[in-house]
Amino acid sequence: IARGSALHQPKTFAYLFTRRVGEANVPATHSDDLPFVFGSLEQPSFMPHPAATPADRKLSANVRQAWRRFAETGDPNGPGLTAWPQYNRATDPYLEIGVPQRSGTAFRKPQLDVLEKFYSQ
């Protein structure tokens, strides 16, 4: 999605979410980011999860601040936030949103290159 979006919108930012509420050693799955984005870590969910940890609450506050900045300014970066690289098709940068947060490049690039080639035909 970032590859296509960046063709039309230079202010594109990609992320990989790798944290589950209360479970540091279990890979995140689809929609595990939602309690962090909406600050609902302590709320019941259709997918039961353990109690939120202090690290979860800190990550949630950071994610919500970045999302808010992005909505207000078109850029999720700001004071106190982990640097989130602007997307660039040449290097495929992204922010890994987990504990810790860190930048990366070319996540699953070979697989995405095949898909892009297939769907562009």
Image (tube, rainbow, N blue to C red):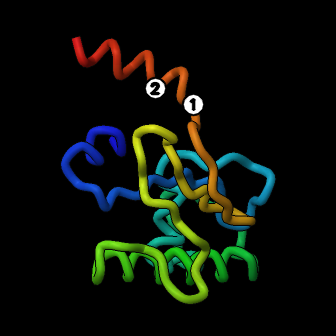
Left or right: 12, with 53 as reference point = left
Task: Quickly name the residue at label 1.
Answer: 108
Q: Nearer the viewer, residue 18 or 117?
A: 117
Residue closest to the far front = 90
Image quadrant containing the N terminus? top left
Q: Residue at x 67, y 65 (%)?
A: 101
Left or right: 81, with 52 as reference point = left
Q: Are marks 2 and 1 in contact (CB under 8 Å)?
A: yes
> Please, is residue 90 above or below residue 76 in the view?
above
Task: Pinpoint residue 13: horizontal percent, then vertical percent.
Answer: 41, 58
Task: Pinpoint residue 76: horizontal percent, then vertical percent.
Answer: 43, 74
Image quadrant containing the C terminus? top left
> Please, is residue 13 above or below residue 65 in the view?
above
Helix, strand or loop status at disc 2:
helix
Residue closest to the far bottom = 79
Left or right: 5, with 81 as reference point = left
Q: Nearer the viewer, residue 61 or 82?
A: 82
Residue density around tag 1, few if under 14, some if 14–19, many if 20 or more, within 10 Å: few
Name which residue type carries label 1.
Arg
Name which residue type carries label 2.
Leu
Helix, strand or loop status at disc 1:
loop
Q: Residue at x 43, y 16 (%)?
A: 114
Task: Quickly name the residue at label 2.
Answer: 112
Task: Pinpoint residue 38: horizontal percent, then vertical percent.
Answer: 44, 76
The label on residue 27 is: none
